[in-house]
Amino acid sequence: MNNQNLFSTKGLLLVAKRAVLFTLLFSYMNCTDDKQKVVNFTNLVLAEEFDVNGPPNPEVWSYNIGTGQNGWGNNELQYYTDRPENVTVQNGYMIITARKESFNGSQYTSARLVTKGKFEQQYGRFEARMRLPWGQGLWPAFWMLGADIDDNPWPGAGEIDIMELRGQNPNILLGTVHGPGYSGGQSISKSYTLPNDRFDTGFHVFGIEWGPNYINFYVDDVLYNQITPADVPGEWVFNKPFYILMNVAVGGNFVGAPNTETVFPQTMLVDYVRVYN
Ligand SMILES: [Ca+2]
């Protein structure tokens, strides 16, 4: 009887603990939902909707061409071009296509677009609606670099990765910041796993809300991470203007090389890029 009573008390305690945990979890979820619904930036300052067929709007976008130094610092395998085979606007989408083809000494081609010198902003809501490529060795990204990078080399200039994904894990994206003392493998990062779905089979909105001393990362309606100066083991370098980059890399340290299972070509469809302040 004593044992039975003890058991029941323990059982009750367990139930109570679970109730408290559930309540905490529920209020946390509500809290993040509230943060996400009450957006901090609502004034639309850039709306690239990709409604005009042809090359992307030259007033906003330019290109990184070639292989960069050491595969853009990551041993990437693609040669970036501005050819329509690698980037074009059609039927409301910007289409970045990674191809397997021999080109100027590289085995793959793709495109990397930047708004450097054309659109740079400090703080705001930056979001893109996209359908991503997939497969071993594919590395799509929507990201930002500090606009002072020419005078303040990476990682001093800072990097905000709004969305990057390893093509071999098409349901897991990462939101990350790099800065002095926390770059590359020491970057501050959090992943988000799409429940029962993949990022290459439909469109999703990837975004940040970025203000003084915070960056909130979200996917669709889910705010999945907030990074503040307390989270980085070095100088906070995100209180200054940044520019946008969009690309599909092939290979490189982050994803490894494609293999025989990787299907080419692979496309990243960008329905829109919108920025608010
Ligand atoms: Ca569109």
Image (spheres, rainbow, N blue to C red):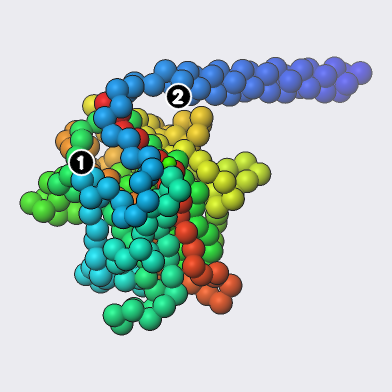
| Label 1 neighbour load within 10 Å: few <14, some 14-19, many 20+ | some
Is residue 175 toward the left or the right of residue 180 in the image?
A: right
Amino acid type at circle 2 is Gln
Q: Which type of secondary structure does the marked residue at label 2 adopt?
A: helix
The furthest residue to the left: 151
Q: Which type of secondary structure does the marked residue at label 1 adopt?
A: loop
- Which residue corresponds to mark 1? 119
Residue shown at the point (15%, 46%) measured from the top left: 117
- Which residue corresponds to mark 2? 36
| Label 2 neighbour load within 10 Å: few <14, some 14-19, many 20+ | some
Residue 224 to residue 190: above or below: above
Q: Quick check: marks 2 and 1 in contact, CB under 8 Å?
A: no
Image quadrant holding the N terminus, namely: top right
In percent of width and height, residue 249 lies at: 38, 63
Image quadrant holding the C terminus, namely: top left
The furthest residue to the front: 53
Residue shown at the point (68%, 23%) measured from the top left: 18
Which one is earlier in the sequence, the residue at label 2 or at label 1? 2
Amino acid type at circle 1 is Phe
> Can residue 206 be seen here?
yes
Residue 157 to residue 80: above or below: above
In percent of width and height, residue 97 lies at: 42, 62
Q: Quadrant of residue 69?
A: bottom left
Residue shown at the point (53%, 43%) measured from the top left: 203
Residue shown at the point (43%, 70%) measured from the top left: 99
Query: Is the distance from the Cβ of mark 1 to the nearest ligand 1 atom less than 8 Å?
Result: no
Q: CA distance from mark 2 to mark 1?
A: 25 Å
Image depth: mark 2 or mark 1 in front = 1
> Can residue 179 be seen here?
no
Quadrant of the displayed image that contains ligand 1: top left
Q: Quadrant of residue 238?
A: top left
In percent of width and height, residue 104 lies at: 29, 80
